[in-house]
Image: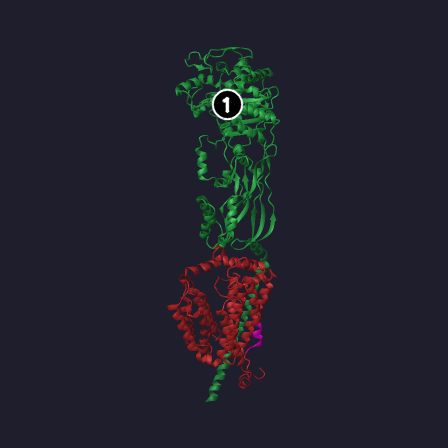
Chain colours: A green, B red
Amino acid sequence: MNRRASLGTVRDELAELAVVSARFRWLVGAVLIALVLLGWRFAHLQLNQHEVFAGRADDNRIRLQALPPNRGLILDRNGQVLAENLPAHRLVIVPERTRSVADTLAELEALIELSPADLERFERQRLRSRRFEAVTVKPNLSPEQLARLAAHRHRLPGVEIEAYLTRHYPHAEALSHVIGYVGRIDERDLRRLPVERYRGTTHVGKTGIERHYEDLLHGFPGFKRVETNAQGRVLRVLERSHPTPGRDLQLSIDLDLQLAAVEAMGDHAGAVVVLAVETGEILALVSKPGFDTNLFVHGISRQDYSLLLGHRQRPLFNRFLSGGYEPGSTVKPFISLAGLESGQITPTRRIFSSGYFQLPGHSRRYRDWRRGGHGWVDLELALAESVNVYYYQLAVDLGIDRISRELALFGFGRGTGVDLPGESSGVLPTRTWKQATFGEPWFPGETVITGIGQGFTVVTPLQLAHATAALAGRGYTAPPRLVGNSETVRMVQHQPAHWDAVFNGMAATIHGSRGTARAIAADLPVRMAGKTGTAQVFGLPDDDEERRRRLGGEIPEHLRNHALFIGFAPEEAPRLALSVVVEHGGGGAGVAAPVAAKVIKRALELGH
Amino acid sequence: MAAVMARRPIAPGILRLDGWLLLLLVILMGIGLAVLYSAGEQRLGLVWQQTARLGIGMVALVIMAYIPPRLLQLWAPWLFLAALGLLLATAFFGVGRGAQRWLDLGVIRFQPAEAMKLALPLMLAAWYGRQPLPPGWRDTLLGLVVIAVPAGLIATQPDLGTAVLVTASGLVLMFLAGLRWRLIGLMLAGAIAALPLLWMNLHAYQQSRVLTFLNPERDPLGQGWNIIQSKIAVGSGGLFGKGWQASTQSHLEFLPEPHTDFIFSVLAEEFGFLGVVVVLALYGLITLRALYMASRCRDTFGRLLGATIVTMFFLYMVVNVAMVSGLIPVVGVPLPLVSYGGTSAVTVLAGFGLIMGLYSRRRFMDGA
């Protein structure tokens, strides 16, 4: 029984052994094939495609980090610093190292004041950052804040003080409209800036020189090749290329003269422009009042900004570049040249000033500023005393086309091309301009008042100074520049005698016994030529007597006329040309001329 | 015939362990721990934990080697039913995120599906060990049912990967038992025909895995990320590798799960193609040695069970390695004996213990 069963089992086992053994051989074959296939796969990945994957592994881990360049300095002509980079400190939080970001912020608020704007910016930046990246809580810490934070930092993990460079303007108020300022890069900047060059940069020039010479001042970023992990955390620096700092800019501005001009203006709003006649270099360029441009570097607070916007004198307004003023009587030297050139007047021909002028067949009276008139006047006296009737007559004799042509030669009606953004071109009235702007023909009455710089003519103080420089250079000057040189060009061509005649009249304005600006002659170390002017404040009658009567006594300041002055010195060989505009200064003689005298005197002292 | 008849008593030695196999296993585990140290961010704690688990696995190996196979064959139905019961319990009381895979026993949590990986082959081996081979229609059908019930339960957890592997272990055993080629062909045809049906029944995440496998760039930051980064790790290793602990892909956290499912990528990156060949050879040698040992078992039960266990060990390796090299979709299968993780290491080593126990009780034949 046992044996049979055993026999049966043996036979089964033999057959089964054969079956199973056959399947074992299949299995072994399958195992070997699988191993070969896997080996082949890895040979493909690791040997054939090694280069590809090695590259991708490096792409994975190696990133470029930008090292922002240091911005170039801005200096005055003597090397005095006008814009610099100062070390500053900011408070940052590394979220992953804090116990709780909210608690940390609460503790920080107990130490230093955090504005809603600070907190808002922090939250915004934090959302865009990784947990291990530092997020700014407050920039530009004061020394007291620094000290307080330093004392408490040990109990605030994740809170750090970072040093960085920030733009600073030591003479912000005096040069706000020249230097301009840098500010945080915003959406609009992003659209115009080359992304690569601004990697890692937070600020960009927004106005003034900072904006115009952004390309030079910015420099080129350097790069750090860093190894990062999958989350982007930097583990080590593999390679570093240093940034190329921006170029330092030396302006033609003389800081001492600039400050003197600012001081000379006192509390008035207005503009002063001083040019070197031959080179076009701008020695002083003032728009009063200025403002603290440093406020804009870190993002101006709403409160400060509304103060600036609401200020009666509009400090944000760039008067020398965008301020449009009637030239008033300062236009008379230029009209005189047109008259001399056309033969309508000669230096000696006299005209009788009765106190007013009337166009034939018209009833309107165009007045002299002096009631009763100036009597018989030649060109010199007409300029020195600013006789309106002389110029009413001359303007009518010349016609608007002649006047426009002469004024255009001196650069009226177009930008000077100065190296600053936002220059306005003013208005040079012509027949075609009138037709295009108002859809009306030119009326003869408009020619009359154009002769004394009223009506449609609008100039900027810079244009006026540039025209004065062309006058002083007897037709030769260079376009105004703040940086670098420009070539002296001949803008206007007249006979020497004609220049002399106008120079004489302008000198008599100051040094003549009846000159409108004779009061300043005593303060001047050299002979100077000049011309006063008054620009009407819109909407009021054109003579002060009339106004005074209507307004009853004293005229409130904001309704007073703008005072203008142009001049150059020394008269015999002019090196300096200037224009002064004092808003609501009343008449040019009373307020603008003394400012000019102080500025010219200082300029001569400084060796210009 | 006489040679076969002349049997000797069971091997006399008390030592039921196999020296060659043990040596190969220890070398593999050593390499595994070295790679783990690097892949696990040089955390020694991780290495000690894994060493402890392998130690437990070695204890399981020894215990299994000393359990008489006859007992196992006797207990097989009960062990199978017990494992089935646990699977059912998991379906009702199981825990886990998304899928109910774990059974919480208070002290430990474990996956009953893991136990089924041994219980099913044991059951089938015990069954076919008593039946005449090759199996007839009836036995084949029965075998398929025995496979289908636990596989179905696991698939509904849902844990498709394990279900497929458990099914595979059953099918491998049936193949070894001599399943007719005609049937194999029929089943293959049936499987291919059923593919669209299967696809429609897949969960969305399973479908997207397959799609991502077919085109990793479809989701380069999501599921495609794993495959892409693993291939980068492997490929950037080159012939000689970047050196031990010099894997950038895992240390810089580009590679997901570098110490578990993707540990082979780390090995490939640090030791290059040469390291890959050595480790694949090691797996091959272990498999062939264990297959040889299984083939020398005294009875069909032992041969079927032993060979199935080895084949599954090899299959896990193939699936894992094929996965990290982008040959098949990502299917959370660890690399046996190398990936960090306890359950699988213990199961695998217990299986090898079983094989050693079976082999030590082989017949010693004259002149064979």
> Does A78 sit left or right of B97 as displayed?
right
Task: Say above or below: A13 vs A295.
Answer: below
Q: Which residue is drawn at 60% across and 49% down?
A: A240
Snapshot quadrant of residue A486: top right
Task: Say above or below: A362 vs A407.
Answer: above
Q: Position of residue A7 (x, y in %)?
A: 49, 86
Give the magenta-colored segment's residue range. Answer: B17-24
Say what amino acid the circle numbered 1 marks.
Val
For disc 1, the chain is: A
Task: Say above or below: A174 vs A1.
Answer: above
Task: Say above or below: B279 vs A581.
Answer: below
Q: Mark 1 points at which residue?
A: A591
- B283 and A567: which is toward the camera: A567
Q: Can residue A133 be seen in this view?
A: no
Q: Is residue A430 visible?
A: yes
Quadrant for the N terminus of chain A, please: bottom left
Q: Position of residue A203 (x, y in %)?
A: 52, 41
